[in-house]
Image (cartoon, rainbow, N blue to C red):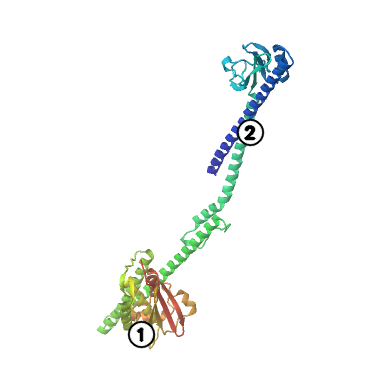
Amino acid sequence: MLWYVGVLALVLIAFSITVYALLAAILYDSLDTELGATINETSLSLVHEIAVEGKGGRDAAASVLDEHIAPRQAAAIFDSEGNLIAEDTAQGGIHATLPSMNLVPQSDAELYTLPSGQGNSVTSRRVAIRRVNIPATNNSYIVVISQPFDRVNRELRLFRIILALAVLAALVLTGAGGWFLARRSLAPVVEMTERAHRISAENLEQRLPLTNPHDELGHLAATFNELLARLDDAFGQQRRFMADASHELRTPLSVMRTATGVTLEKGERNESEYREALQIIDEQARRLTRIVEDMFTLARADSGRRAVNFHDFRLDELIYEVMRAAEVLAGRKGIRIDVGKLPLMPYHGDEGLLRQMLMNLLDNAIKHTSSGGLVSLQTETHPTRYTIIVIDTGTGIPTEAQSRIFDRFYRVDKARSRAYATEIGSGAGLGLSIALWIVEAHHGRLELQRSDQTGSAFAIFLPVNNSH
């Protein structure tokens, strides 16, 4: 507001100076025009009185001055030698004086300014002087007429006062109006600031007030509210992650403590009982290791500290290797693994991460497929992408759960997942989340294509010309 008032002040001052200069030029020009007209009329009348009427120089000069000179003007007529022959003083006894003879023009009138204090005038005056030649007598006369600047100065002084008052009033009104409008316009900012100060991690559900959603402040508040919504969702996910992680870590620890407690409860145990307890502890320890490793992987991915090491390799060879490893897991449940003939699939990416991604998807498919079922892998090649589809013949994923399958620690069938986890050390609900992050790190897409009573199909889309 102060900057605006300052700029407006400069503009108004510049405008006022310009208008004042134009008015002063007009008034001074009007004074010169009036003096020029008076001296021309006086000169013509003097020629007429002498040449036509035949009057003497002194009589003609006195008659002409009495006829044409205004009360505010001082006039005098001199002969060619510079002797005064007639005079008409202005109000206050102001006389018109003759300058040096060498300054008198030969024909046309000339104008000059007589500063204040010269002659007997206390104010500056504008002077017109002209030499008048009489053709019949070959004589010449010098006409001098002066007029003060007081009326022009008075009008300019009044105009200066009006301009100063107008500029001052405009600045005061503009400043007051700008202050009012600024406070009114920025009131939502003050309210948003106070509300933002009260928002913390404990009350992220609160939102900033949205007075006008169509102006700039409304857009700012809406954007900030969207940020708060994302933060609230992120904090909610973090809390759920912490709760789920605590639950997942507590279960194997509880099993281990129970196994050790039961084993140590009795003073003497045979070797098979100790081996059984150690086997339970080993299984739960492997499960804990898997959970901690997956959590560490996701934590590093979220913070951006998990580097993706891109290099060239054969994706079809990687698929064969992962399928052979998955056959070991599937054999324990009596599940058949099928992969057709793979085309040549050169690729540029992180081989280790892609191996983990495929293993997680196959692990998930085996987990939800009953004994005697089939897990198959199909590939499609396109000019711009590779498509890998993992299909199982399990019971499928319920419709209400399909939107959450990539959430961390989310499991459709928790009881069955834990039973499977006891066998192979998985089932923490992080496999699909890690797989999704790996695919997105390779600029690809992972989605659930279908899931019904006949089974599920997950599709992986990887760009052929992948670059990091």
Element carrying mark 2: helix
User: Which quadrant: the N terminus?
Assistant: top right
Position above or below: 103 against 188:
above
Q: Amino acid at mark 1?
A: Asp
Q: Quadrant of the C terminus?
A: bottom left
Q: Position of residue 337 (x, y in %)?
A: 35, 85
Where residue 226 sits: x, y (%)?
A: 50, 62
Would residue 297 be found to the left or right of residue 33 on screen? left
| Whether label 2 touches label 1, CB < 8 Å | no
The first of marks 2 and 1 along the sequence is: 2
Q: Could you say which disc has been placed on residue 448 in the image? A: none
Please name the residue that numbered disc 2 is placed on: 162
What residue sits 36% from the left and 74% below the top?
A: 357
Mark 2 belongs to which amino acid? Ile
Instruction: Give the crowd class for mark 2: few <14, some 14-19, many >=20 residues within 10 Å.
Output: few
Task: Give the residue pinned by disc 1.
Answer: 338
Quick check: 99 above or below 354?
Answer: above
